Image (cartoon, grey):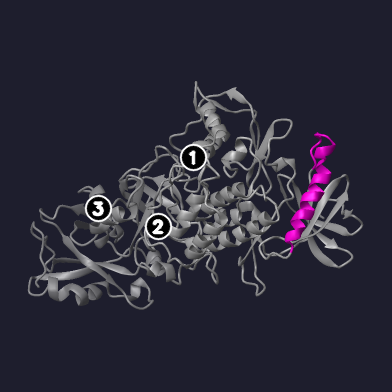
């Protein structure tokens, strides 16, 4: 261990390297010196204060770990090999799997997963949880960071799904209210009945699983807010919107698991049936994501981030699933009333603390203190933290996009920029009120403009779920392999300098050759005399450079007979830049002009046939 003294635990396990730290302790890569094998050893942090002999943390940790070891044969649970005591604390010896990543890290790096892949992960996790429940073992801390994706026996990445931290948590993540009045868990994943002082049950594990699956398919947790109070309030009192990226069966199982009242919650058997159905469901066809040619998904220039297996982001789907109102237990009703009534109350003495696995641990005392009401009608990041936007988008705004998963996949980071000065990558063409058929409405509103563009991409950015006053969904247009260069369609003004990527059939321009030989193109009304009228796009075949292509000849071949024959007209071809041509934007925008160099008269030209 670089910088640390090697230790041998229980005379057998030599700690080699710290792999990470979490809310209940550190995990080490160790060598079992008897078997000469690598293992993972979890060092359980023991609280300084104790609650007496009946609540001895070392004894309780050993007991729970031994119970978890009963699941050592289950394929979806990390195997516990041994439980030892050293340095006045328990140590859990588990299997070590190189190449393992947790679900939280995968989603944060690559964005939301496909609906069928989330269903596969959920079915495996549910199987592991159910096996424990049959033995009376409650996990207590189901969350993305405790779901591991490991290579299978053939070496294929992320194919094994494994629950970790199973039944071995001590009080830093205990699920009940202790004698000192503490209730702990991971914010936004703890079931409402646990927050109200109830015991951990199989139903509370299922609630946490529902939150985990929601996070995996949407990229954000349904109750995640910017403050602890707001997170607790959302978990207690807010029915989240149905996940927009999920297939219909996956959406049903997630919303069923998120029922506030455990009596209303979907049971394990029904959840298993729906997850099995969801693994066979077709990929979502509508929602927030690329809405153009199906070739996007198979374009070899844009490989998926998990080639070789189906851990791939997709666009959203059905919004038809709605949460049926459920019953509330009297204790939960009382807590909600305490949170929102009489000037606002919240669970007090609460702190967020970052844990080593990237999730925040939650520790809160169950007593009422006066605080401002935590009601948050709109999130600080209304489209989710990954986008980085703090305000709702408006039609006409231009953006640059950072596509974490390759172009036009997943949820990008977005930055607002000037439409004229900053060579934008995309533009908001329209906004649509959240809910309903957002994708189809964006498709309809941008249809005419997309017909004038070469290789456009429609991307629908939907708001983060769970907001009482969400912003409108934004219909954005991008060009595959090129920037827009400036505003599009009706957001342009006559007299503006324009680039080829802003133009399309039906536009008219005047051109002026500069001293350095470049041309400045100005958008003008076709009703007045003008130099050229754009008639359509032509794509060059092959893979030659732009300089090797006769642009005028390419346009003459495609449009000349129909637009230039016998009219004293000739065809010209314009392309973007050499760089964008080489990147794949191999299009010429074809125009018609007078052979004698004079302007065309006012009025829109018509094709000959």
Q: Residue furthest right?
A: 11
Front of the two marks 1 and 2: 1
**Principal SS element in the magenta part?**
helix
Question: Which residue is painted at 17% across and 61% down in the image?
Answer: 532
* Relative image position of residue 187 (x, y in whole percent): 60, 41
Q: Is residue 210 above or below residue 452?
A: above
Label 1 crowd (10 A; few <14 / some 14-19 / many >=20) = some
Label 3 crowd (10 A; few <14 / some 14-19 / many >=20) = some
The disc label shown at residue 85, or none: none
Query: How far, Cα to Cα, is label 1 from label 2?
Result: 28 Å
Q: Is residue 114 visible?
A: no
52 within the magenta span: yes
User: Which sits earlier in the primary sequence, circle 3 or circle 2?
Assistant: 2
Q: Is residue 584 above or below residue 274?
A: below
The disc label shown at residue 489, or none: 3
460 within the magenta span: no
User: Which residue position holds label 1?
Assistant: 327
Question: Which residue is painted at 26% across and 56% down in the image?
Answer: 444
Query: How far, Cα to Cα, is label 3 from label 2?
Result: 28 Å
Question: Where's the C terminus, which quadrant?
Answer: bottom left
What is the span of residues highlighted in magenta in the rendered image? 46-72
Q: Is residue 94 left or right of residue 355?
A: right
* Relative image position of residue 411 (x, y in whole percent): 46, 53
**In which image quadrant can residue 9 be found?**
bottom right
The disc label shown at residue 317, or none: 2
């Amino acid at each position: 261990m670089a910088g640390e003294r090697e230790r041998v635990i229980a005379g057998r396990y030599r700690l080699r390297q710290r792999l990470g730290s979490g809310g209940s302790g550190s995990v080490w890569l160790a060598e079992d010196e008897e078997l000469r094998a690598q293992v993972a050893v979890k060092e359980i942090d023991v609280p300084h204060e104790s609650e007496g002999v009946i609540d001895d943390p070392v004894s309780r940790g050993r007991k729970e770990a031994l119970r978890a070891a009963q699941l050592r044969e289950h394929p979806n649970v990390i195997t516990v090999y041994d439980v030892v005591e050293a340095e006045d604390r328990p140590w859990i010896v588990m299997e070590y799997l190189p190449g393992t990543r947790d679900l939280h890290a995968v989603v944060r790096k690559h964005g939301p997963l496909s609906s069928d892949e989330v269903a596969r992960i959920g079915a495996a996790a549910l199987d592991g949880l159910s096996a424990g429940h049959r033995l009376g073992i409650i996990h207590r801390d189901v969350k993305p960071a405790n779901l591991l994706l490991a290579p299978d026996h053939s070496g294929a990445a992320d194919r094994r799904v494994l629950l970790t931290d199973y039944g071995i948590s001590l009080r830093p993540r205990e699920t009940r209210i202790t004698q000192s009045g503490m209730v702990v868990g991971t914010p936004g994943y703890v079931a409402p009945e646990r927050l109200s002082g109830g015991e951990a049950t199989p139903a509370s594990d299922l609630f946490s699983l529902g939150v985990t699956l929601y996070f995996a398919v949407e990229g954000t947790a349904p109750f995640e807010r910017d403050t602890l109070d707001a997170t607790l309030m959302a978990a207690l009192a807010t029915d989240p919107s149905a996940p927009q990226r999920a297939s219909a069966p996956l959406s049903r199982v997630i919303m069923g698991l998120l029922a506030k009242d455990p009596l209303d919650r979907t049971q394990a058997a029904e959840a298993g049936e729906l997850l099995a159905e969801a693994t066979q469901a077709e990929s979502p066809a509508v929602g927030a994501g690329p809405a153009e040619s199906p070739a996007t998904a198979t374009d070899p220039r844009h490989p998926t981030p998990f080639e070789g297996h189906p851990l791939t982001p997709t666009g959203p789907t059905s919004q038809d699933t709605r949460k049926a109102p459920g019953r509330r237990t009297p204790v939960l009703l009382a807590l909600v009333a305490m949170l929102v009534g009489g000037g606002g109350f919240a669970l007090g003495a609460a702190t967020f603390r970052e844990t080593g696995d990237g999730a925040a641990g939650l520790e809160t005392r169950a007593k009422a203190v006066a605080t401002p009401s935590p009601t948050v009608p709109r999130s600080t990041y209304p489209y989710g933290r990954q986008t980085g936007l703090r305000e709702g988008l408006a039609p006409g705004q231009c953006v640059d996009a950072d596509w974490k998963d390759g172009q036009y996949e997943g949820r990008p980071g977005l930055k607002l920029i000037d439409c004229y000065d900053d060579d934008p990558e995309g533009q908001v063409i329209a906004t649509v009120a959240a809910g309903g058929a957002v994708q189809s409405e964006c498709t309809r509103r941008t249809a005419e403009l997309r017909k004038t563009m070469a290789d456009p991409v429609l991307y629908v950015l939907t708001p983060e779920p769970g907001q009482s006053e969400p912003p409108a969904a934004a219909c954005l247009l991008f060009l595959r392999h090129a920037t827009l260069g400036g505003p599009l369609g009706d957001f342009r003004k006559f007299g503006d300098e324009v680039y080829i990527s802003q133009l399309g059939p039906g536009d008219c321009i005047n051109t002026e050759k500069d001293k350095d030989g470049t041309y400045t193109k100005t958008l003008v009304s076709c009703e007045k005399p003008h130099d050229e009228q754009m008639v359509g796009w032509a794509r060059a075949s092959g893979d030659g450079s732009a300089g090797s292509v006769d642009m005028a000849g390419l346009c003459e071949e495609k449009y000349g007979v129909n637009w230039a024959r016998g009219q004293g007209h000739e065809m010209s071809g314009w392309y973007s830049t050499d760089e964008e041509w080489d990147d794949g934007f191999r299009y010429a925008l074809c125009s018609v002009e007078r052979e004698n160099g004079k302007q065309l008269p006012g009025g829109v030209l018509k094709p000959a046939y």
